[in-house]
Image (cartoon, coloured by chain):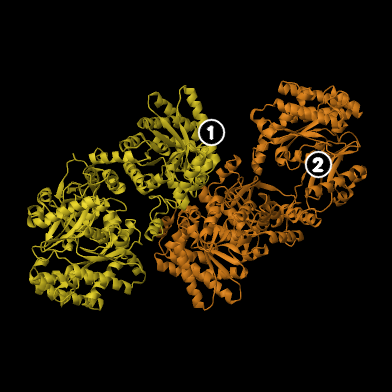
Chain colours: A yellow, B orange
Amino acid sequence: MAEKQVYFFGKDETEGNGKQKALLGGKGANLAEMASLGIPVPPGFTITTDYCISYLKDRKISDDLKNEVAQAISKVEKVMGKKYADKDDPLLLSCRSGAKVSMPGMMDTVLNIGLNDETVLGLVKQSGNEEFAYDCYRRLVQMYCDVVMGVDGEKFEDAIDALKSDVGVKLDSEFSADHLRTLISTFKSITKEECGIEFPTDPVEQLWGSVEAVFRSWDTPRAITYREMNRFPHDMGTAVNVQAMVFGNMGENSATGVAFTRDPSTGEDFFYGEFLVNAQGEDVVAGTRTPQSLNNDGRHRLPDGSPAKDMETLEEIMPEAYKELADIRDTLEKHYSEMQDVEFTIQDGRLWMLQTRTGKRTGISALRIAVEMYNQKLMTLDQALMSVDPEMHLDQMLHEQIDPDAELEVLGLGLPASPGAACGEIVFTAEAAVIAAAGKDVVLVRKETSPEDIDGMNSATGILTARGGMTSHAAVVARGMGKPCVAGCGELIVNSAAGTMEIGGKTFKAGDEISLNGTKGHVINGLAPLVAPNLEDHNLTTLMGWADEIRRMKVRTNADSPDDAKQAIKFGAQGIGLTRTEHMFFGDERISKMREMILAENVEGRIKALAHILPMQQADFEGIFRAMNGFPVTIRLLDPPLHEFLPTSDMTEKIKSLAGELNVSYDHLVQRIDALHESNPMLGHRGCRLGLTYPEIYETQVEAIIRAALVVKGEGVDVQPEIMIPLVGTVKELANLRTMAVELADKLIKDSGTDLSYLVGTMIEIPRAALLADQVAEHADFFSFGTNDLTQMTFGYSRDDTKDFVDNYIRKGILPSDPFQQLDQTGVGQLVEMACQKGRTTNGDIHLGICGEHGGDPSSVDFCHRVGLDYVSCSPFRVPIARLAAAQAVIRNR
Amino acid sequence: MAEKQVYFFGKDETEGNGKQKALLGGKGANLAEMASLGIPVPPGFTITTDYCISYLKDRKISDDLKNEVAQAISKVEKVMGKKYADKDDPLLLSCRSGAKVSMPGMMDTVLNIGLNDETVLGLVKQSGNEEFAYDCYRRLVQMYCDVVMGVDGEKFEDAIDALKSDVGVKLDSEFSADHLRTLISTFKSITKEECGIEFPTDPVEQLWGSVEAVFRSWDTPRAITYREMNRFPHDMGTAVNVQAMVFGNMGENSATGVAFTRDPSTGEDFFYGEFLVNAQGEDVVAGTRTPQSLNNDGRHRLPDGSPAKDMETLEEIMPEAYKELADIRDTLEKHYSEMQDVEFTIQDGRLWMLQTRTGKRTGISALRIAVEMYNQKLMTLDQALMSVDPEMHLDQMLHEQIDPDAELEVLGLGLPASPGAACGEIVFTAEAAVIAAAGKDVVLVRKETSPEDIDGMNSATGILTARGGMTSHAAVVARGMGKPCVAGCGELIVNSAAGTMEIGGKTFKAGDEISLNGTKGHVINGLAPLVAPNLEDHNLTTLMGWADEIRRMKVRTNADSPDDAKQAIKFGAQGIGLTRTEHMFFGDERISKMREMILAENVEGRIKALAHILPMQQADFEGIFRAMNGFPVTIRLLDPPLHEFLPTSDMTEKIKSLAGELNVSYDHLVQRIDALHESNPMLGHRGCRLGLTYPEIYETQVEAIIRAALVVKGEGVDVQPEIMIPLVGTVKELANLRTMAVELADKLIKDSGTDLSYLVGTMIEIPRAALLADQVAEHADFFSFGTNDLTQMTFGYSRDDTKDFVDNYIRKGILPSDPFQQLDQTGVGQLVEMACQKGRTTNGDIHLGICGEHGGDPSSVDFCHRVGLDYVSCSPFRVPIARLAAAQAVIRNR
């Protein structure tokens, strides 16, 4: 490892830049970028992610690194005019993790490094504030012993509580220097007892202990789980940022805070933030003190009764520092062309920026920010489109909301930390959330959340906390997950031990039902009624309009009924890519005729039953065609194996009643059901195999499609039927069935005396069809990639059976993601690409689309764009997601 | 159609040749070839197969063809010195079909064309034989009205019988000219009545009627069925051969016969044939008269009591014609380098050859002919090797056979699932088979078999099932075991509860005796007499020796036990390509430990059960390694889903007893079994997926393999273990498991203080592994193509479920053959070829083989050779077939 591993940043010299996120982590790259912009950043240096990866192999710090770090520390000392851990005027350091992507709360931080019984005296001298200096020392010991030495943090909290009750104080800040010295001593004893070794007094040992602990925190179970949940690779590693300490807790002229350059919840263009006077950063996150609003605008927007409503703002207390911060806000938005999330500290009236990064936001907020920043010329059109995450942001917009007209019993009010509606049963622990969520919707209720709760938050449908602000852990994580959250609900009393909570004068226990309105901060009794989302939102329609102009691919929907089709049109669908006809057979009257058909002894019997089915199917198709006036409708002929329409052989009662209905003996029926049984129905007698074994079934369906099209055409509807033959694996399957369909359709059209165009094509869902796509294409007007089945067969995974080991594979990094959710581009994608290329060699006009569920997954949509598909098709609710993803694909691949 | 459609052949001018079989059909091409060789052939011409195909589209004869035919008839007239249908000295014509491949008896022939009430008088005059002339006329009317005009032939036979009884004669030849005139008149009346039109008297109309009838006969149902049965394409068409008639029935100096240039049954080098004096060809085939031996050698070889034993031979009756025929025999063998099957006619002492073609023969005969013709310098080594059909000829040689001369009562017909003969007492359960087999031969009769039946199948001498196809469990396992099997016998009704079966109108109970002919699919009443295969046969060993010298690919075997391994060595196997370890778990003691392992609640429980399994597996491997001294042994780690080792949830009694054994509650056990149930086990939790979920299983197996190898190496055995990881679909599956295997193996080897080389590789059986073979190959010492599963997933066919529609597909020409028997070279083969190429790009040393059942199929072996595999592996009994097929692949692709 001969390359440079340490990158310095500071006022006059900065070695990295904002583009080096992979090497320096997001935090490190942005610190370098801010320093270069002349923004006040405490000087420091970043140890690279490369070094982290190499460190984790043998867990040894090299001499090369030690030399590089020593040189960088000298530079920090020079800028700050202090020596590290000097006895008279000590420079102290912070040590923070920072991976390429943000993993909030997942990894470790150590502050105030360099303090010991000697250097603390220097800090006392320089600050003139004994309590401050010993509080810093106390924090170092507490953090170091927890994070680096692995002592259970609870023990320190207990010691603090014990001392508070001993000396009769309520807040940490009320401790005297003596109290703090006592605490430090207690902490050291606890550590000695737990670890068998002493808290290190050597500042150099402290620094390396902290750096190594941050590196190691990359591999903690919770960090691994977080990456798995977010599909982040495990081999990115984290950078370590070591910086000169600046203190927000040096007295009443000091403060610390976090801010968003726009409201992360609504997207409104005002400078949103919170701060605490005389505090270190961790105090803001911890939620034990109520943070104050950054500015007067923010305070006005607080709900009545909010504790901060009457508190002074930074704008009032420290107008100069606030002015500087507000200017930095403008600089950052202009520079990054994005809404930023910043951390700052004011030490004795002087502002220091500790972090900037793209701010997490809700769906509503993302849309408003994109539209407004484009209008303000802060974003280009491409940037505006790319700033909205189709999966996370749009998906939120498309979910149901609490009916605004319903009469609700609002139990209490909290902060509208993350918008949307959540209804479900109360759970009080993350573990309970994970277990219960398997079967039902649950709302996780906590005093406050911590990184240990991540799994539970992910499982819950919504999150409610008693403490914490808009930038508390619960709020930030919930917004990141797109889950509704009401945070800092002051009226809420959570009694975890008893498993109850009190709010609005009522007591609730686990299992009781509540609802959250995360948009308004309401906690509601019972399950609130929901209504469809508002698709008329101005920002949504504006952004989708931009997306529609830019995208090349059309977006269709998978819909099996006129209602679904109408819904999809509202979502912007440009046709139907997949109508499954089998769902139409499950109605009461229909299934009975279907069963009669299946159990018929001969072709005459089947034709007789099908004659009843034909008009019903025709009526279905007429409805869909009318709903899709002007758009193509792809109808897939019958696909599932016939036994799916029958009771299974262990359903004695059902079989008896069916036998009576069909007027056959019970034994005979059982025998027929047994004969249809398949060991692997996925690979069995289905799709076009049925169409070739029982031609009368497909003939009936083709007839129903063409007759329906002729009827609605007569009504003036622009009808564009596309007949899709499923599960083709050999060229002759398609050739034969196409001939059947075309002969029948042409005859019906000719007999009708009018004209009608229609297409006949096939699903590409069997690997062999992809391999022989050049030959298959000679008989197809279109290919529609059925990537669900194609994934099943290319991997050899049955979706019904493999969930457990696929989850296990993802956890172990064997699979990067669930291939049924994100298209496997390297394997299945190879077949898709091959089929596109081969298909075009023999049929230059062939129309290409996808109707597997991947059609609604943004990364898969990007792939579809790259291989040149003409359209994607997905479920109605994912149509807007696919529209935006298709536009982003154009931008990304331009 | 401007090309030449008519090819003349005759003494002085011949337009076609023997290579033009596709265009002229086999018969036409060989007639031209014989004519060119100066062999006496009645002059004539061939209308091409191309014309047939075009004719069948609109069923009209073009003017061009009429002109070409008229010119060709002129040439025939010139050679014969007669005019067609001349009143004084008529030239008559024959009209015979002849496709590229022989379809004996499938298509039509019309003889004596050109006769009518006038021309028959010319024939009387020229032959001086009124009975002969009217018999010819009678035959024409009978054949023409049947073949061309479609009258039911029975009606003519009835008329003949009626006349015989009227006039009191027994044989056709006893009819007087008057009788024959009466018959002709009767035939004409029948035809008029049946068809409404008259038998045509116009000779030109007769000729075209016959030609068109032959063309049309290509599309008769029986011809179509025959082609489907033999997998001949439907678009070859047939040629039509029109020739001058020569008459074997012109008197006592005329004759007709058929001959083989060598004995088709034994292969002995003597001129074998039969003839009839004063007869037309159809009389020989009809079998109403006893044919005489061609020569004295032939007569001597007849068994005593044969009617022809005392009859004169052609050699005696017509020594000159015989001498000429014997010379032609030599000419043909020398010219064709193959044993020939010929037809000839002697008209008034003059020999005419009507046909020559490669003669069909038995396995024994094929070997003897190949070896002797090579020794006689009549065949090159390549020709000798190519003259033996590995599938048809060798397979016959390798199984104990039912005495072909025995009289048998065939009760019913099933699929010839595994060749050979089995005789024994009926048993209906695997348990009964195990018990009974200790003392006697038993035939296991089941509706269908499952893995639970393995022990029983192993104990039985043959297997009969009512359900399932050529690739059903019973069939696959039986072939693997080399046990005769008749599968899917539709007529068989098994009543397990009553312990009886019904077939052929009889009811059998356990203990009754039956026999199976697995080569033919016959179920036979009682114990059929058997004859043993002779592996020491000189011709067999000679030919296999030649094959071994010429082939490039090695041939291994699939074997799961030391006994199988030893058997395979006898058949010439050069190692084991696939040892399935799961079969080893089905023994009584083992399955109990296996179940304990599967049902264990945690890893400790599994490890405890595995500790019992380890020494048993080790002992298995030791036995196999010893048997395979000096050859590589590929062992596949556990492949099937765990539920295959458990009773199914409807087996109440078995579960109760298992629950007792394992000391758990019945309900608990049912719950565990249900939890392991899979909808599509083929695509479920199996193969390396198990190895990653339960690492301890694969670790135990690797340990057993390496420990066994170390033990037998200590005994001086040359041991070459190859560890094979099944069902790999992602690179990391293999990478992780390879690391596990190598670390464990290296540790064990190091601890043993000796050294041992071993390989670690993978099956390529998941399409995705083939697509990513370049990456997979980086972690594999070898690829073994598991083409059974690869075929299942590439086609999306479950072998257990698709028999019915696959058979239907083959009948309809949608599939050329069963892809589980013959490798689908265009689809699955593409993946195999891709994997070979990609694999070699990243791992130039990678060893490539196949262990799917295709490894024993000759056409698939040819493919394996072409894509450059290093070896094929197949069941022991197919090893010689694969050895010869591999040699033929070299010759064919040179």
Question: Measuring 17% from the left and 43% from the top, which residue is drawn there?
Answer: A408
User: x, y (%) of residue A844?
Assistant: 49, 38
**Residue B11 in the image, given as x and y percentages of width and height:** 84, 37
In this view of the protein, which residue sits in the foreground, A548 or A515? A548
Amino acid type indicated by mark 2 = Met
Could one spot residue A102 in this view of the protein?
yes
Figure label count: 2
- Which x, y percent locates residue B97? 74, 35
Vertical relation: B757 (above or below) B480 = below
Q: Are marks 2 and 1 on the same chain?
A: no
Label 1 secondary element: helix
Q: Chain of mark 1?
A: A
Q: Is residue A649 visible?
A: no
Q: Nearer the viewer, residue A555 or B353?
A: A555
User: Label 1 is placed on what type of residue?
Assistant: Thr
Instruction: Assess disc 1: are there few (<14), some (14-19) or many (≥20) residues with their C-alpha within 10 Å of its C-alpha.
Output: few
Quarter containing the N terminus of chain B: top right
Which chain letter goes with mark 2?
Answer: B
Question: Where on the picture, by quarter, is residue A213?
Answer: bottom left
Q: Is residue A88 left or right of residue A338?
A: left
Q: Nearer the viewer, residue A814 or B299?
A: A814
Left or right of B649: which side holds A495?
A: left
Q: Badge 2 local density, few (<14 within 10 Å), some, or many (20+)?
A: many
Cβ–Cβ under 8 Å for marks 2 and 1: no
Q: For residue B34, which numbered disc appears in the image?
A: 2
Which image quadrant: the C terminus of chain B? bottom right
Residue B261 x %, y %: 82, 48
| Drawn side of residue A98 relative to residue B808, left or right | left
In which image quadrant can residue B490 be found? top right
Q: Secondary structure at mark 2?
A: helix
| Residue position marked by numbered label 1 in the rendering | A739
Q: Say which of marks 2 and 1 sits in front.
A: 2
